Image: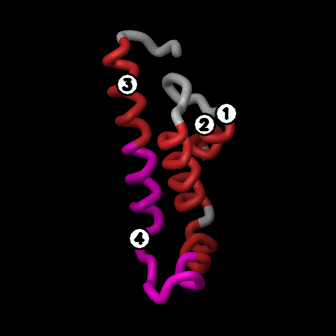
Amino acid sequence: IFALGSAAQSWLIARLNLTERALLLVGGLLMVFSTLMEALYELSTPWHLRYTDALGALFIVVALASQWARTRSLGTARP
């Protein structure tokens, strides 16, 4: 839920860029609505999508790592 909220507000540790926002949005949707996302994926492609929760968690961790690395290089959490 926090990933969806962060994507909606465009803020996590610092202001989100478009890639981080998309990662959090898709990751949050995969975690919260896993069966719906799996059904939509299987409807649009011939493949079966497994492990939606793990994939969603991976997207969220990548967005968090990106935020952490970007704010660490800036030396501050403010934009």
Q: Is residue 38 above or below residue 66?
A: below
Q: Amino acid at mark 4?
A: Tyr
Q: Amino acid at mark 2?
A: Ser
Of the numbered discs 4 and 3, the one sitting upstream in the chain is 4
User: Tag 1's secondary structure?
Assistant: helix
Q: Nearer the viewer, mark 3 or mark 1?
A: 3
Residue where numbered disc 3 is placed:
70
Q: Position of residue 52 (x, y in %)?
A: 46, 67
Q: Main secondary structure of the magenta part?
A: helix
Task: Determine the CA span between mark 2 and mark 3.
Answer: 16 Å
Q: Amino acid at mark 1?
A: Gln
Of the numbered discs 2 and 3, the one sitting upstream in the chain is 2
User: Tag 3's secondary structure?
Assistant: helix
Q: Which residues are magenta?
A: 41-62
Q: Among all residues in the image, which is located at the extreme front?
A: 18
Q: Amino acid at mark 3?
A: Arg
Indicate left or right for 16 with 61 as reference: right
Q: Are marks 3 and 1 in contact (CB under 8 Å)?
A: no
Q: Position of residue 11 (x, y in %)?
A: 59, 29
